[in-house]
Image (tube, rainbow, N blue to C red):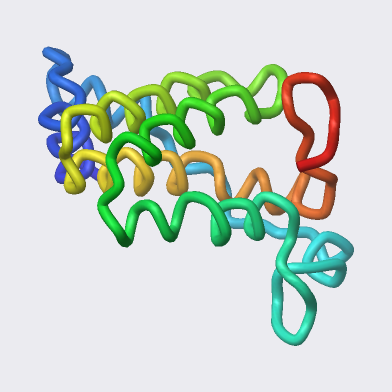
């Protein structure tokens, strides 16, 4: 966890100590409800909405190292976070900032921190819900 926090500090230019960041980037419990797991995401089922969006949008621009597009997409992701999920927007915006600086390692570190913090909870609580844009329309 400290290693990821150090990368996050380097990626975002944050002056916080690694121990402080490690405390802020907590890992959610690794529990996925049976009903959510059965709806999507696990083969042979189709991808879940957020998973599908990330695979179609973020993954290709990350792989191409298209930093301008990746920064814009991570900014969009900041607005897709569930209401009341403290830290989602900040992590996505930190990823966007790293992309705008041209730091693939910085983007990777922020993505890893976000996944460590939110993946299990998202899967347990929201996995199969439609992904909505800021106007409430499905993506």
Q: Nearer the viewer, residue 35 or 106?
A: 106
Q: At which x and y percent is residue 31?
A: 66, 57
Foreground of the two, 123 or 2:
123
Query: Of residues 101 and 116, which is closer to you in this image?
Result: 101
Residue at image point 37% right, 32% down: 71
Image coordinates for residue 87, horizontal then vertical, percent:
49, 22
Is residue 135 rendered to the left or right of residue 79? right
Question: Picture coordinates of residue 28 (x, y %)?
Answer: 54, 43
Name the outermost residue toward the top.
15
- State the residue at coordinates (42%, 60%): 60
Q: Residue at x 44, y 30 (%)?
A: 72
Query: Is the residue 131 above or below the residue 33 in the image?
Result: above
The image quadrant of residue 139 is top right
Image position of 17 with respect to 60: above or below: above
Q: Quadrant of residue 19?
A: top left
Taking the image as shown, residue 124 lies to the left or right of residue 14, namely right
Quarter placement of the N terminus: top left
Q: Residue at x 63, y 52 (%)?
A: 53
Percent across and percent down for residue 25 are: 37, 32
Quarter-of-image position of residue 63: bottom left
Q: Is residue 13 above or below residue 117?
A: above
Residue in the foreground of this view, choosing between 82 and 133:
133
The reply, left or right, for residue 84 in relation to residue 54 is right
Task: Count how many numbered circles sit on residues in the image.
Answer: 0
């Amino acid at each position: 966890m400290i290693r990821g926090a150090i990368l996050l500090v380097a990626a975002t230019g944050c002056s916080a100590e690694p121990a402080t960041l490690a405390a802020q980037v907590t890992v959610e419990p690794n529990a996925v409800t049976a009903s959510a797991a059965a709806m999507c995401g696990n083969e042979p089922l189709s991808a879940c909405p957020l998973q599908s969006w990330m695979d179609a949008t973020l993954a290709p621009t990350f792989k191409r190292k298209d930093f301008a597009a990746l920064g814009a997409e991570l900014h969009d992701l900041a607005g897709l976070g569930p209401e009341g999920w403290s830290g989602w927007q900040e992590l996505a915006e930190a990823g966007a900032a790293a992309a705008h600086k041209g730091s693939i390692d910085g983007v990777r570190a922020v993505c890893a921190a976000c996944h460590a913090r939110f993946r299990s909870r998202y899967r347990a609580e929201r996995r199969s819900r439609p992904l909505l844009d800021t106007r409430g329309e499905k993506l």
